[in-house]
Every structure is written in C-alpha cells, then in structure tokens.
Image (tube, rainbow, N blue to C red):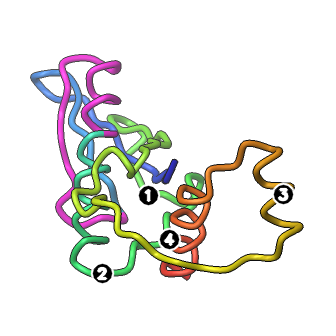
Amino acid sequence: MLNKVYPAIFETDPIGYSVYFPDIEGAATQGGDISEALIMASDVLGIMLADLIEEGQPLPKPTEINKVSLDSEKQFASLVAVDLSDYLTMNEPIKKTLQIPKWADKRAKAMGINFSQTLTEALLEKIEA
C-alpha cells in the first residue's frame, strides 16, 4: 500500500461541507454531510497526488495539523488518508531483474513478504525524499 495523509480544511456551506487541502493546489471537493465529505476528500487527494507522481512532480510536504490556519468560527481541520495504489494509472507492472542476498530471500519468503510491493514502496519513499 502507498498510504499518504494530508490535512484538509472542512467548512460548512449551503450544500453541506466544502473541503480543500492547503498543501495541494486545486485539491477541493464537497459533500452533503461529514461522511460523504471525508470520502470525497480522500478521493480528490488520491487523484491529485497520483497526477503529481505521474507527471514526475514531487509531492508537497504535509503541513502539521496543528499548524493549519483556519477560521474557527466556520472551519475545522482533519487528517485525510488515501492509498495511492488505487489511483496510479501507471501501475502496469514491468519486469525487473535484481539480486538480493540469499539470507534476505529466505527470511522474506518465510515472512510472506511481497517483493514487488516492498520494492515499489521503497522506491516511492526514495523518490519523494
């Protein structure tokens, strides 16, 4: 899984709640109630982050939730999570040949570790650094 978490600002509006991500330009949505707004927020977060990755752009660093500026009269902040593997369209697998130490292969197989998933997660972490 390629999980990411960003703070979102929720604001009441005539329809229910509007949501935007202060760290991600253009990432905004809305929902009729809190539950729907959270679902929609996770979806727009996945779409926007996957688009940045596929365009070769770095992901913005998430602001700490307690440092998000908001109008406490009508807004509140919440963390929103998304699994990016659900959104990346360039997920078509390609074959790579690599070598690892025999001991690592044996222990990883015994633990049921998925080599492709582990390598993908490690690469994403390195690429974002």
Q: Which residue is mark 4?
A: 124
Q: Which residue is mark 3?
A: 106
Front residue (pair 43, 72): 43
Marks 4 and 3: which is nearer the front?
3
At mark 2, the secondary structure is loop
- Amino acid type at image mark 1: Ser
Tell me what residue is drawn at x 22 percent, y 57 percent: 89
| Residue under label 1 | 69
Disc number lying in front (4 or 1): 4
In the image, residue 125 lies at what x, y percent?
A: 56, 72
Q: Which kind of residue does numbered mark 3 sit on?
A: Lys
Q: CA distance from mark 4 to mark 1?
A: 29 Å
Please name the residue that numbered disc 2 is placed on: 57
Real-space Cα separation, disc 2 to disc 4, in angstroms: 12 Å
Mark 3 closeness class: few <14, some 14–19, many ≥20 residues within 10 Å: few
| Residue type, mark 2 in image | Gln
Check whether the beta carbons of the residues at disc 1 and disc 2 lie within 8 A of each other: no
Q: Mark 4 and mark 3 in contact? Answer it, CB < 8 Å.
A: no
Residue 31 part of the magenta-drawn span: yes
Query: Does 37 lie within the magenta span?
Result: yes
Q: Earlier in the sequence, mark 2 or mark 4?
A: 2
Where 33 sits versus 29, above or below? Answer: above
Is 23 on the left-hand or right-hand side of 20? right
Give the distance between the C-alpha atoms of the residues marked 1 and 2, in whole angstroms: 25 Å
Amino acid type indicated by mark 4: Leu
